[in-house]
Image (cartoon, rainbow, N blue to C red):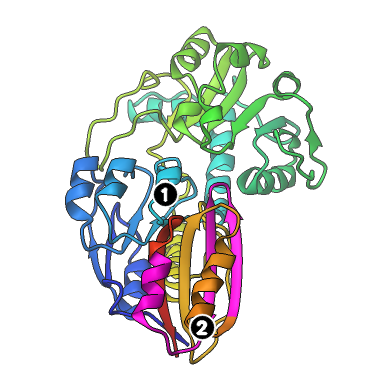
Amino acid sequence: MVTLDTTKLPMRALLLENIHPDAVARLTKTGYEVETRKGALSEDELIEALPGVSLLGIRSRTHLTERALAAAPDLVAVGAFCIGVNQIDLAAASRHGVAVFNAPFSNTRSVVELVLAEIISLARRLPEKNAKLHQGVWDKSAAGSHEVRGRRLGIVGYGNIGAQLSVLAENLGMSVCFYDIADKLALGNARRCGTMNELLESVETVTLHVDGRPGNSGLFGDAEFAAMQPRSLFLNLSRGFVVDHEALRRNIKSGHIAGAAIDVFPEEPKGSGEEFTSVLRGLPNVILTPHVGGSTEEAQQDIGEFVAGKLIDYVAAGSASLSVNLPAIALPTAPGTHRLVHIHQNVPGVLASINRVLADHQVNVEGQMLGTRDDIGYAITDIGAEYSAEVLAQLQAMDVTIRLRTIRCV
């Protein structure tokens, strides 16, 4: 097994935003002192909280900035206990030698089930019927209420969520079209559309499942709503900044859009109980949910286990598998060796320089792996148990070195 060299790294973890207790339990069992906080932290609050913290766990409302990272020299890795990582300055994390992990698969089913539930609810106009009954009004009518069987669903973004939604929607009897900028294999009988407009003109329900890249900001506005068929349904459970909510409001008020379900917003409260403001409040046949697409107990448990495991593996063995900002490499551990984890600027000759230092000190290399990603290089080297402090000093002093860690394998 591989154990952490506790002489090199503090064993403290800070988990924010109600991360599942299973993550706390797993980190605690590994030997971490874990502090938890219910809400998100502001930039200044993060800067105050991070000294001495080696692992940080957040969800979507805490933003990890360059300034916060610069003030956290002890931070080794960050876990985004969610799918999205646009709340983290990934380039800055890489420059500071901080690995970032997320949970790209764990809450897929939860999001898909909510989408299907909302499509059915909107098609049957359940939000309005529910509101009227709460007001004491009995309005038993089939007007405007439809089955989803036989209706055409358009999925924008055919990743993990979009693809699984495609399969389950077909099981409900819907026909599916999708649009994605990447070349994706169509599942079942789904049909790929060559352009966004082709999809919008072809379907009666549109649901967005795109990622948080900056290029998706403002993806859906007046032009896109105008291209949709009259009385269509619209859903967004991806990113808040993707949709122009003023444009959506206008199209709902005009009746061009018959109903909408929105789970994500351009600005969201930092904690439960804070006031939520939106131009979409009070509109008919509109479902607003507080960013709970992946918030089921099952999904949060899976996410807690998955991300905590990735953080532990990274600290204990240098495994960067599924890291979103470092080269995704992992080297099998060799008992009786010391592991050097070297994060550096991606320039030619770094591996040769590392090996030259080791050779000059007659240190034998037992195993080695190098990966690069954009401007970052990541080298894992297993060496014989005996080495001098001068070896580490020379590796640390290399102009390209961003971060150097040592791990003892026993």
Query: SS at mark 2?
Result: strand
Left or right relative to 341: residue 322: right
Measuring from the top left, give residue 183's x and y in whole percent: 77, 40
Q: Is residue 292 visible?
A: no
| Front one among 364 and 22 | 364
Q: Give the labeled residue for mark 2.
A: 383
| Residue type of the residue flagged with mark 2 | Ile
Residue 120: give x, y in percent of width and height. Answer: 59, 36
Q: Which residue is mark 1?
A: 95
Is 294 situated above or below 148? below
- Region of the chain picked out in magenta, as a range: 367-396
Question: Looking at the image, which is closer to me, 55 or 51?
Answer: 51
Q: Quadrant of the C terminus?
A: bottom left
Crowd rating for badge 2 (residues with CA inside 10 Å; few <14, some 14–19, many 20+): many
Q: Position of residue 351 (x, y in %)?
A: 57, 65
Marks 2/1: CA distance?
26 Å
Residue at horizontal 30 percent and vertical 79 percent from the top: 6
Please identify the quarter of the rendering in which residue 29 is found. Answer: bottom left
Front residue of 137/344: it is 344
Q: Is residue 244 magenta?
A: no
